Image (cartoon, helix red, strand yellow):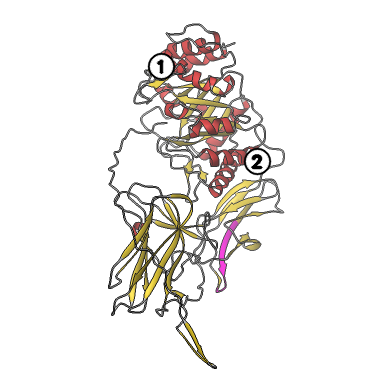
Amino acid sequence: MERSAGSSRRRRRSRPVLGGTMAVVAAAALTVTGLVSTAQAADVNNARNAGFESGLANWTCAGNSGAIVSSPVHGGTSALKATPAGQDNAKCSQAVKVKPNSTYTLSSWVQGGYAYLGVSGTGTTDVSTWSPGSTTWTKLSTSFKTGANTTSVTVYTHGWYGQAAYLADDFEVTGPDGGGSEEPGPVIPGAPAGLTAGATTTSSVSLSWNAVSGATGYTVYRDGVQATTSTGTSATVTGLTADTAYQFSVSATNAAGESVKSAAISARTAKNGTGPVTSVPKHAVTGYWQNFNNGATVQKLSDVPADYDIIAVSFADATATQGAVTFNLDTAGLNGYTDAQFRSDIKAKQAAGKNVIISIGGELGTVRVDNDASATAFANSVYALMQDYGFNGVDIDLENGLNATYMTKALRQLSAKAGPGLVLTMAPQTIDMQSTSGEYFKTALNVKDILTVVNMQYYNSGSMLGCDGKVYSQGSVDFLTALACIQLEGGLDPSQVGIGVPASTRGAGSGYVSPSIVNAALDCLAKGTNCGSFKPSKTYPSLRGAMTWSTNWDATAGFAWSKAVGPHVRSLP
């Protein structure tokens, strides 16, 4: 969904082919004469913090491109993840002490995008090797010889411009001890950041936080008293009283001691027997309500007309924790609309039989769910918003990419917490629903048993294929019906298909159609009447209805859209 228009172009670099000479360091010979033996000193790994178990200690990553992750890892509990961006190839390096005139083997394990491993400052021939990317851990290895005066070299790894992030783990610079391989003792870790409350019940609160470099455990405090401990970055505090606010903080620990506590956050347990009990009608109209001022009429929720059955609050905000979201009412931008008024209006809409859901994403959204941790963070944080504000469910409007595997996991976890009353909507772009192999389409099919409706955005699109293989231009009844047919014949139930359009010519960059075109498309699909040149092979009388961006642009146009489309949707068979 649009906040503003914009475009970007990416310049592609050519990829050089790099190679390195592979070699194996000869084992030290052991000679024995009688009872006297002499041996060459044993080879050691001269790299420090080689497995990133102490975070990025001893490593330097250009442009803050490197981060420590707990999954996937090759060994231990941590690995390096570095992400190229723009003119930065995400180079991470370490100065390693070595002996002159000595041979060393350099190796590491890599995964993900293009990954390079190399060494500079050898005093002889600097070498490197690379991998074009792998979905599993792959070992890179090369060897080098130091010059007569070389006592330090720089080992490095990097990705490639415009390519995906790479992972690296378990570095080795194996050879004679250069005198710098002894690891320093642990230091007291810093305080955890990003403490966030997730799912709550009447007797528990789930918490999560960011990992701290060098920490081996964490201690969670409730109202200043230790409540529980964890070896990971999440914990659930139990034994709490219903409908009660608590203060939580967390500290990091290791062998050196305990950090100071994090900044405290407040979380309230759920009330006994609470939860909205509304239901979505057979045919429904969805409208997005803007929590910002972009020139459309500023509204309170109470200003949204009764023609809307599902109101999607746009949008939740990403947090520092990947996958997690929060909500911040734009009181200043909404002419002083207060949090208390907003919450009261949600309850009033629900009392009138309407569903109010929280929308995730939008044109500028940055929420990313692409691993197990972020899937859990997403589910926990969305459920926490549902508990806090009383939202009936969630809308998925991720316009900058979606991972079907992990979004499915996230929505399954959310459904398990919220129960059968969860309202789940999606608003993919037209390109996302051209094929069942697309990530959005796969997600919709994966969660079909809990999915309420997919309201595809039939605008800002350009021409697209219909289910008959013909090309249709946006802005016509055929565009709406022929593209809806792909979803209807691709596995979604008709009750899970809605038509999403702008409420006015100012609501989108292109693709506006008049309410009469929307109503004709609904008739064509549900009753087989008022079709254009494309006529579906059968009718879909249980078609869910229509959606618009946005209730605010509808208000700007005098509610012409909802006044025409709302009654028509309710009149469908």
Depth order, front residue of 158/550: 158
Depth order, front residue of 259/458: 458
Disc assigned to residue 306: none
Depth order, front residue of 307/172: 172
State the residue at coordinates (55%, 11%).
538
Residue located beneath label 1 in the image = 470
Crowding around mark 1 (Cα neighbors within 10 Å: few <14, some 14 to 19, many 20+) is: few
Give residue 529's position: percent from left, percent from top: 50, 6
| Front disc: 2 or 1 | 1
- The amino acid beneath tag 1 is Lys
Vertical order, 491 against 328 (above or below): above
Q: Disc 2 on helix, strand or loop?
A: helix
Give residue 191's position: percent from left, percent from top: 51, 64
Give the CA separation, mark 2 to mark 1: 43 Å
Disc assigned to residue 417: 2
Q: Disc 1 on helix, strand or loop?
A: loop
Prevailing secondary structure of the magenta residues: strand
Horizontal relation, residue 341 to residue 65: left or right:
right
- The amino acid beneath tag 2 is Lys
Vertical order, 497 against 422 (above or below): above
**Magenta stretch bounds:** 248-256
Vertical order, 153 against 74 (above or below): below
State the residue at coordinates (72%, 38%).
273
Give residue 58's position: percent from left, percent from top: 41, 69
Q: Is any atom of residue 308 visible in this view?
A: no
Circle nearer the N terminus (2, 1)? 2
Crowding around mark 2 (Cα neighbors within 10 Å: few <14, some 14 to 19, many 20+) is: some
Q: Residue furthest bottom?
A: 35
Depth order, front residue of 37/488: 37
Give residue 492's position: percent from left, percent from top: 57, 24
Horizontal relation, residue 475 to residue 416: left or right:
left
Magenta stretch holds residue 126: no
